[in-house]
Amino acid sequence: GTRPESPPRAARGTSPDASPVAMRLAVVDTPLAGHVPRRSAPARRRASPRGGCVPRASSADGSDLDRDGRAGSGSSSRRGVLRAASSALLLPALAPALPARADDLFCGYYVENRSVTPQWAFKTPWSEGAVDVSSATKLRDAKTFLRILGKREAAAEAGHLPVLCLHGGPGLGFKYMESCEILASETREVASYDQIGCARSSLAQPPPKGVFAPELFAAELARLREVAELDKVHVVAHGWGAMLALDHVLGPLGSGIASLTLVSCPPSYARLISDRRDALAKMPSDLAEALVDGDAGGARGANLSEAGRALYARAWQEWIVRHESARAAGACYQGLTLGGAGAGVGARRGDPPTAAGAASASAVANDMTGGMFFSVGGALADWDADAGGRLAQISSKVPATRVVRGENDALSLDAAKTLVAGMTRSDMKPRVALVEAREAGSCVFLDRGAEFLEETNAFVAKYDKVL
């Protein structure tokens, strides 16, 4: 059978970038030594999908690697496997990454849960493509990398709708959410993509300052769904991706969403920053001060002395483990830099991003947040989930919504309750649930992977046939 990718070997650390202001993400992807770029065209419902899909790769190509790293046989496939590097949030780390755990497919999910990777993980068809979103985003030569894992025929027979994953950032890609692909199992498709300007959707030439805005990413998402024919889907979204999901669902082109799972979604960007500041107050004062000082004006530590930058790096590591994921040393965080895709083969350790890729991702982050993590700025400064009272429409737009928060997330429980209150204030029969995951940070799907995926699988299955 076709094997989408080989399980990664144990992660190895990489040295920090030479530049003290370089932003590093601890992320890893499967080793692809000897990998030859794939060229077969992705397809879903017909051989020639709606205009805009550029072929990249699929499990039909003979260059596949089996679980031992040997060349595997090919078979027919569908759309896009996007091997993209990413993380939940844009986090600078100027020191060497923490020691890594053994890796496996799906962000080390099966290793972490001490279970054997099932055969479907190696045999499920996959394909890879780039969707031209130039007209939607008004960006020249803008192509978004799309990955789809799963067998459409089996999903249709089972009556299962696809799951579409939206990653956080802004400025990163999908890789850190890869464990969500387990939802594909044997009878469902899981689609994911890197937002334009990020990871393997980077732009060769960043646009003028101020171009990247929430509206642009909403337009991109609508175009992707159109071209990939994701007419009816479940959405699983995290962080900024959850904010984007709300913009999409509550906008004019957001129909066809069977269920919505929002992980670490704030009621407003200002509230998110306020909660991060409150979380800072609970850290050792020297670390908190280093983070605030290095964050000023979007400097990302470049404004600090050599000793200050070292403290800044240590403070970031502390923040990540406390509030993003206790698994920050694991399979999804080790060894890659901002920009993600390196020279284009894949998001791999030892394959740093090109200068153009890093510049593209930085442009996204700078436009959207002002390059800051603990201060309000950028295009998201005024973002409000309930702008104009729109949250009251959610139940008329989506049959069911889950708001998921990890108890260690910097985003407070009160903030999550505020979001839910806005969604349910007009409901006679509320269709929104708030779920809090114990001993988890923002990345609940990493820290409490088994529980999150089991609950999400049951949740989406319940609403497969409501549209």
Image (tube, grey):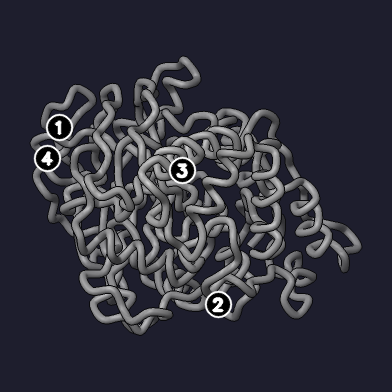
User: Dot 2 lies on which element?
Assistant: loop
Real-space Cα distance between discs 1 and 2? Answer: 41 Å
User: Could you give the CA–CA distance between mark 3 and mark 4, rounded to whole angstroms?
Assistant: 37 Å
* Helix, strand or loop under label 4: loop
Q: Earlier in the sequence, mark 3 or mark 2?
A: 2
Q: State which mark lies toward you, 1 or 2.
A: 2
Q: Dot 1 corresponds to which residue?
A: 72
Cα–Cα span, label 3 and label 1 = 45 Å
Task: Classify residue 118 as left or right of residue 244.
Answer: left
The Cα–Cα distance between marks 4 and 2, rounded to whole angstroms, is 38 Å
**In percent of the image, x 58 and y 72: which residue is there?**
254
Q: At x 31% / y 56%, what residue is drawn?
A: 199
Label 3 secondary element: helix
Q: Residues within 10 Å of mark 3 (few under 14, many from 20)?
A: many
Binning the other alpha carbons within 10 Å of mark 2 as few (below 14), some (14 to 19) or many (20 upward) gives some
Camera-nearest residue between 419 and 355: 355
Residue located beneath label 4 in the image? 35
Residue to which mark 3 is pinned: 312
| Residue 161 seen from this side | yes
Amino acid tagged 2: Leu
